[in-house]
Image (tube, rainbow, N blue to C red):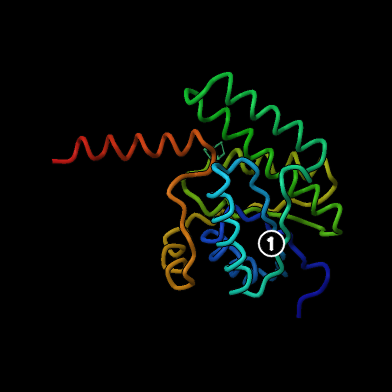
Amino acid sequence: MATDDDRLLLHACCGPCASVAVPDWREAGRTVTTLFFNPNIEPAAEYRRRLESMRTLAGAVAAPLIVVEADEAGDETQRAFEAWRDAVSAVGPADREARCRLCIVVRLFESARQAAQRGFPRFATTLSVSPYQMHDAIEEAGLMAAATFGVEYLYRDQRPLFQRHYEESRRLGLYRQPYCGCALSKWEAWHQKRARRASAP
Ligand code: SF4
């Protein structure tokens, strides 16, 4: 039986990734509470759609869900978010790596802060389900955030679960997003799609 020591605050980037990450953490013996904090999803309608999908998932797997909006984040997170905005406006689409690393820091700093504030001993993120994310950046940001807020960070490579998230999303009727989240990623996805169409026989 789970005890207080098993509690895990799981940052969720979206319902589909959480649909496979939550059961996986439970199988590993963790009692999971989910946290939705993804402040740079644009436009606002897309943010609401992803949050709604996360609410559906939380209900389906009976996991508590905490939602933190951008203006509720702590000072460290706000500073990281400003650095992310500066990086986006300074380098634009040219340096995806720089902006994505900062974006991960923003989300994991707030996750660690929420874990510490709410008495969770540890936190993790569903970003580790995606093969499109930089896993070294996830691990680095998680450890840095953990050290800053005095909680434990758990990294688990959940990429082998990625294929299953399609199946779970269909089964649970979850909205699956067509781009990563920020406005630049939407623009990039649109261009990639156009390029694929243009090169199709
Ligand atoms: S592409 Fe995704 S990970 Fe990178 S900055 Fe945009 S939302 Fe964040």
Vertical order, 156 against 144 (above or below): below
Vertical order, 33 against 195 (above or below): below
Vertical order, 75 against 89 (above or below): below
- Please state the horizontal and vertical placement of residue 43, each as a whole percent of the image: 54, 42
Q: How crowded is mark 1: few (under 14 residues within 10 Å), some or many (20 or more)?
A: many
Q: What residue would you read off at disc 1?
A: 34
Identity, as a three-letter code, of the amino acid under mark 1: Thr
120 or 64, which is in the foreground?
64
Vertical order, 50 against 170 (above or below): above
Image quadrant holding the N terminus, namely bottom right
Instruction: Say which quarter of the image contains residue 166.
Output: bottom left
- Please state the horizontal and vertical placement of residue 190, each as a whole percent of the image: 37, 38
Instruction: Say which quarter of the image contains residue 64.
Output: bottom right
Name the element at disc 1. Answer: strand
Look at 58% across and 39% down and name the residue there.
136
Q: How many labels does the image show?
A: 1
Look at 58% across and 22% down and name the residue there.
89
Q: Left or right? Give the position of 87 relative to 179.
A: right
- Please state the horizontal and vertical placement of residue 86, each as a whole percent of the image: 64, 23
Farthest residue in the bottom direction?
A: 1
Farthest residue in the left direction?
A: 201
- Please state the horizontal and vertical placement of residue 193, each as a whole percent of the image: 31, 40
Image quadrant holding the C terminus, namely top left
Look at 72% across and 65% down and name the residue there.
33
Q: Does the residue labelled 1 lie within 8 Å of ligand 1?
A: no
106 or 147, which is in the foreground?
106
Look at 81% across and 41% down and name the residue there.
74
Ligand 1 sits in quadrant:
top right
